[in-house]
Image: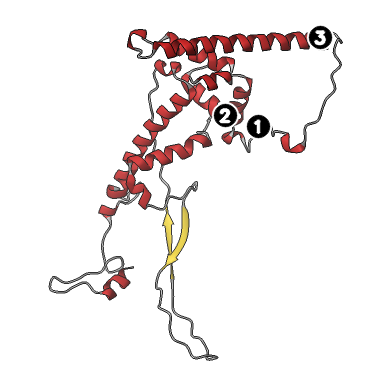
Amino acid sequence: MELEKIKRATIDEVEERMEEIRSLDLDKEKDLGALDKEVDALKERKEELRENAKSKKELRTKILNGEVEVRAIEKPKEERKMGLNKDNYLSSKEYRTAFLKKLQGKELNTEERAAIALAGVNPVIPEQLQEPILTKAKEYAPVLNDITLLNINGAVKFAVEGVNNVAEMHTENAAITPATDTLVTVELSTYEIVKMIQISASVQTMTIDSFETWLVDNLAEALAIKIESLVFNGTGTSQAKGVNKITWSNANSVTISASGSLTAVNVFSLV
């Protein structure tokens, strides 16, 4: 852990990093000097946090005994923070941390338990993990960059151009005859792709950020490989139809005879 990050670390983060260091094989470490400095910084931060906790406890005791008068100071509206609720928990830092710690089998704090409780019996993936998984999947399956990806839950219909006549010359003030342009409805069905990843006890020693990276990489790779396969080879029965399974006809292709040659009209017709 970087020294600047240690200065802002919580007691849980300090303990977590200390546990990681205890599990290291020192014979394989290249820079023992840096590790020694990190340990000293962690000890110093831990002592600082303990002193702060002690001071807070003593102050609370004085307040309870009436030795200190406390007046509530209302923060400006822009500084007030909205508490966790059903509408915002998925994007909260607490839920993201709770979701990952729960997978690791680690103990949750009060705020994290509250965030998980809002999710109910079936916690869903935090919003902070959704975008990295999709971004990483595009790296494993570049074909996804050539596909229009719609972030919609369920089937969807939308219209695209069918027949699109070219513009025509017109005499000023004369009546305009509308072109016989058409629209075609495209309907996309929805299919689920799942991947179960086995998580060993060794991940408990990983930091939250490291575990998140490991989880995203594994999920993205597995999903990308399956989606890429469906894009090309999907049968169309209870799954998407792949490019290699399309039935070509006059409705979706242009046929050029062996003795003929491709013309601009052919290309326009196909488009």
Q: Earlier in the sequence, mark 3 or mark 1?
A: 3
- Colour convention of the picture: secondary structure
Name the one closer to the observer, 129 or 40.
Answer: 40
Residue under numbered circle 1 = 84
Disc 2 marks which amino acid?
Tyr
| Residue 26 can be seen in this image | yes
The answer to whether 162 is drawn above or below residue 33 in the figure is: below
Give the secondary structure at mark 2.
Answer: helix
Q: Earlier in the sequence, mark 1 or mark 2?
A: 1
Front: mark 3 or 2? 3
Q: Earlier in the sequence, mark 3 or mark 2?
A: 3
Which quadrant does the C terminus fall into? bottom left
Residue at image position (38%, 32%) is 217
Q: Quick check: 28 left or right of 45?
A: left
Residue under numbered circle 2 = 95
Residue at image position (54%, 29%) is 96
Give the secondary structure at mark 3.
Answer: helix
Residue at image position (43%, 64%) is 160
Residue under numbered circle 3 = 62
**Residue 141 bears which disc, if any?**
none
Proximity of marks 1 and 2: CB atoms separated by less than 8 Å = yes
Disc 3 marks which amino acid?
Lys
Disc 1 marks which amino acid?
Leu
